[in-house]
């Protein structure tokens, strides 16, 4: 047996750099004979050094094999065990003589909205055996009475640690914020673990997380990687960063190292990445940091974890995307919706206001290009959602305070995806791209779309989503865009009236944006406990 990869390797470089551990051993309860090797693999040099090669014999007692620990580096330890004849190992674990830096009382906060099967499966895993959780707090924002419908989970352990709270739908931000608020007055809670309701996980990851938190040298936040639930060996995120030039997120995962069965991905995971934030599919932060920096902004969904992680970062608290911690989550392309762009635009602008990012003129350029990118592809729903997000930001804090589940339902109903499944991948012809500079090209095509009559409907030209850009040399209308990641198509066509309406309203809102005062101090008030007590009541 060889223990390697995201769950099997011991990521020595992280333990040496970020924890108080300075000695290491392998412990095993052995009956019979075994041969053990430990290889140290460096991600930077790609060199593998065999640091342990030993044959052992035991009669059921515990054996200890000291393992020399590297002081620095981007290294991982790969353990190989060969059992000889009918030998048996009852326990096999990494161990240290070092004392933990702190005791950890971990409260898991799960926010859920009408996903009872998913949350029941997650709770069932968390309530199996003893994983060290102090408390599980479920914030239910769907149909009330969830506690009674999950009564079958309430064994002896659940009765002690499981609490379910009903509240109106305030999105992920409102659910996690309520869970954080509820935990602040609990003297036995030292850390919070924020988890989505639609993840797959192994309960052993909780024990591993608590061990990490116990030995950390400093009060870091700790995140887990996201794996694709539909393609289970695919690595999607190890924390992400904010783009330094525009209000967007850059994924840190190397496209050449996103298969967790491959050695290249193990090397990549051992590197010391510096994410700005980690998604709240699996994210742990100390209660002290919540008291110090406040609760989330009430952004409803899509961006609450981004802003909070960035807030931690700029205030001196790093987030560590710890290798060895990971959950499976539904891939984002499976959730692709036009209305996402409302939240992405609105919430990214509030993040920039809260933290003074990018500046008004750089944001103006990003807003303009982003809006035209959708408009000139005849994607009027996404263009409208970008426009509505900008308008909501211009409306200021009151938009955040009053936005609720009813508003979200109306938005989603008006701008839901029109993608349709396609049984067979179509054949694509060659696509040529204009060499005209972006802004000049966009301006020319906008004028053309504002003036030319709406085309009569006819057969749609099929084009890959990877190629459907405003810079395509000849923009067909109608066009059927094929998404390879989901095997679906959606049809777009030029509409002069919608082009004119969206353009006119965008001009109005971008002018409001350029003169709107920024009030970061007022935004900070929305992170205070007093606001959240009123907001979630």
Image (cartoon, rainbow, N blue to C red):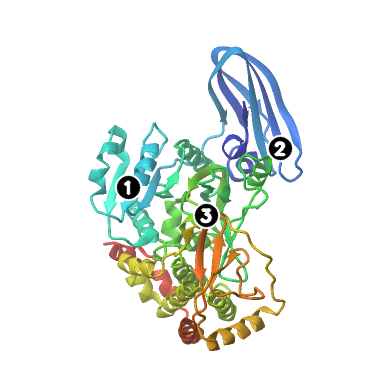
Q: Secondary structure at mark 3?
A: loop
Q: Residues within 10 Å of mark 1 (few under 14, many from 20)?
A: some
Q: Of the numbered discs in the image, which one, if any, rests on residue 41? A: 2
- Image coordinates of residue 404 in percent, x first then y, are 32, 67
Tell me the residue at 56%/67% (across/down). 248
Q: Is residue 273 left or right of residue 104?
A: right
Q: What number is the disc on residue 518? A: none
List the residue tagged with mark 1. Answer: 116
Q: According to the image, label 3 marks what residue?
A: 278
Residue at point 42% right, 72% down? 523
Task: From the viewer's side, name the closer residue of 264 and 430.
Answer: 430
**Element assignment for label 1:** helix
Mark 2 vs mark 1: give the one in front: 1
Image coords of residue 265 (percent x, y): 65, 44
Point out the residue furthest to the bottom here. Answer: 451
Q: Earlier in the sequence, mark 2 or mark 1?
A: 2
Is residue 196 visible to us here?
Answer: yes
Residue 347: horizontal and vertical position, in percent? Answer: 46, 69
SS at circle 2: strand
Q: In this rendering, does residue 188 appear at all?
A: no
| Real-space CA distance between mark 1 and mark 3, rounded to the nearest whole angstrom | 25 Å
Q: CA distance from mark 2 to mark 1?
A: 43 Å
Mark 3: few, some, or many residues within 10 Å (few <14, many ≥20)? many
**Who's the residue at 40% across and 42% down the image?**
105
Query: Left or right: 190 with respect to 50?
Result: left
Which of label 1 and label 3 is nearer to you?
A: 1
**Which circle's residue, 1 or 3, is located before the other in the chain?**
1
Of callouts 3 and 2, which one flags the residue occurring earlier in the amino acid sequence? 2
């Amino acid at each position: 047996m060889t223990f390697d990869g995201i769950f099997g390797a011991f990521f020595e470089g992280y333990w040496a750099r970020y924890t108080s551990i300075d000695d290491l051993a392998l412990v095993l309860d052995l009956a019979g004979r075994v041969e053990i090797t430990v290889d140290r693999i460096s991600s930077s040099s790609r060199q593998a050094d065999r640091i342990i090669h030993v044959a052992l014999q035991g009669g059921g007692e515990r054996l200890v094999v000291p393992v020399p620990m590297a002081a620095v580096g981007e290294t991982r330890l790969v353990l190989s065990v060969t059992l000889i004849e009918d030998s048996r190992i009852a326990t096999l674990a990494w161990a240290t003589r070092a004392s933990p830096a702190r005791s950890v009382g971990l409260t898991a906060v799960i926010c859920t909205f009408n996903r009872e099967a998913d949350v029941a499966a997650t709770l069932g895993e968390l309530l199996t055996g003893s994983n060290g959780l102090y408390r599980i707090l479920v914030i239910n924002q769907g149909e009330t009475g969830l506690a009674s419908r999950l009564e079958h989970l309430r064994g002896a352990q659940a009765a002690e640690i499981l609490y379910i709270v009903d509240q109106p739908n305030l999105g992920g931000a409102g659910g996690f914020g309520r869970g954080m608020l509820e935990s602040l007055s609990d003297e036995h809670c030292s850390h919070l673990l924020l988890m989505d309701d639609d993840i797959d996980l192994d309960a052993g990851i909780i024990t591993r997380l608590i061990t990490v938190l116990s030995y950390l040298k400093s009060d870091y936040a700790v995140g887990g990687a996201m794996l694709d639930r539909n393609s289970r060996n695919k690595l999607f995120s190890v924390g992400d960063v904010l783009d330094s030039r525009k209000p967007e997120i850059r994924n840190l995962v190397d496209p050449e190292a996103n298969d967790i069965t491959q050695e290249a991905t193990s090397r990549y995971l051992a590197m010391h990445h510096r994410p700005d934030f980690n998604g709240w599919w699996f994210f742990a932060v100390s209660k002290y940091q919540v008291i110090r920096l406040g609760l989330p902004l009430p952004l409803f969904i899509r961006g609450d974890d981004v802003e909070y992680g960035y807030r931690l970062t700029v205030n001196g608290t790093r987030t560590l995307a710890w290798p060895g911690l990971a959950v499976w989550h539904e891939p984002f392309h499976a959730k692709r919706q036009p209305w996402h762009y409302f939240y992405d635009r609105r919430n990214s602008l509030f993040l920039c206001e809260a933290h003074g990012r990018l500046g008004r003129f750089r944001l103006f350029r990003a807003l303009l290009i982003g809006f035209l990118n959708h408009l000139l592809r005849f994607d009027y729903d996404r263009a409208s959602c970008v426009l509505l997000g900008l308008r909501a930001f211009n409306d200021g804090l009151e938009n955040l305070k009053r936005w609720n589940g009813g508003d979200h339902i109306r938005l989603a109903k008006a701008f839901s995806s029109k993608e349709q499944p396609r049984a067979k991948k179509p054949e694509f012809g060659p696509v040529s791209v204009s060499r005209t500079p972006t802004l000049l090209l966009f301006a020319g095509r906008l004028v053309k779309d504002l003036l030319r009559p709406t085309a009569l409907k006819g057969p749609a030209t099929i084009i890959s989503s990877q190629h459907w850009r405003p810079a395509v040399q000849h923009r067909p209308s109608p066009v059927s865009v094929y998404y390879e990641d989901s095997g679906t198509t959606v049809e777009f066509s030029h509409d002069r009236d919608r082009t004119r309406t969206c353009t006119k309203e965008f001009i109005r809102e971008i002018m409001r944006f350029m003169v709107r005062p920024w009030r970061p101090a007022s935004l900070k008030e929305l992170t205070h406990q007093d606001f959240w007590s009123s907001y979630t009541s």
